[in-house]
Image (cartoon, rainbow, N blue to C red):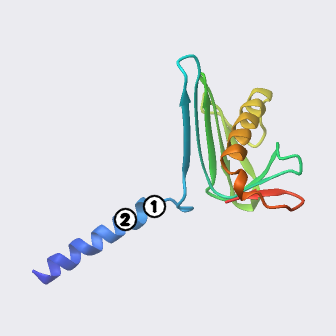
Amino acid sequence: MKKINLLIVAVALIALATSCRRHGHRTIIATNDGHSKVRLEYSGRMILDSTGTVLENLSPGGYIKYEDNGGEIEVTGKPGGSLWYELPDGTKSSTITAEGKMMLLRAIKMIRQQQAHQYHPRSRQQWN
């Protein structure tokens, strides 16, 4: 009986450990005013340029998912600081389209508004 209880506890701990995201913290912001619908989900450490409008780095495993009235983009941080962009058609690329840049800019603005209290006065802006 003790072995069965120990096995159940071990399986539960393994399931819990594998279900947690690597970065642990995920933020979701969703709005719908009846005319427009926006959903933003992100996780990981982000570094923006000095203007606070361009994503320079996203920690490995970190991501930004942004949906805006039918358009969507997903940015994923890869090892070495590279960024990968995925568009609605499933295309993944290390370069971003003009439409993707505009959606990412709107996402960054929402993230900055939500995390304004965590601003780090450095040459670049950084958030967890």
Query: At 15% from the left edge and 76% from the top edge, which residue is drawn?
Result: 4
Of the residues shown, which amino acid type is indicated by label 1? Cys
Which is nearer the eye, 94 or 24? 24
Q: Residue furthest top?
A: 35
Relative to 22, say whether 34 is above or below. Answer: above
Q: Position of residue 70 (x, y in %)?
A: 59, 22
Of the residues shown, which amino acid type is indicated by label 2? Leu
Q: Is residue 77 left or right of residue 56?
A: left
Which is nearer the eye, 20 or 106? 106
Q: Position of residue 2 (x, y in %)?
A: 14, 83
Query: At 88% from the left edge and 46% from the top edge, which residue is drawn?
Result: 51
Query: At 42% from the left edge and 63% from the top edge, which residue is drawn?
Result: 18
Q: Which residue is mark 2?
A: 16
Figure quadrant of the C terminus:
bottom right
Figure quadrant of the N terminus:
bottom left
Q: Residue furthest bottom?
A: 2
Marks 2/1 in contact by CB < 8 Å: the verdict is yes
Q: Is residue 96 left or right of residue 36?
A: right
Residue 19 occupies which quadrant of the picture? bottom left
Q: Residue furthest left?
A: 1
Q: Which residue is mark 1?
A: 20
Relative to 94, say whether 24 is above or below. Answer: below
Which is nearer the eye, 110 or 92? 110
Q: Position of residue 8 (x, y in %)?
A: 22, 71
Query: At 75% from the left edge and 43% from the top edge, which residue is drawn?
Result: 94
Indicate which disc residue 43 carries.
none
Q: Tell me the SS state at disc 2.
A: helix
> Crowdedness of circle 1 by 10 Å Cα count: few (<14), some, many (20+)?
few
Q: Tell me the SS state at disc 1.
A: loop
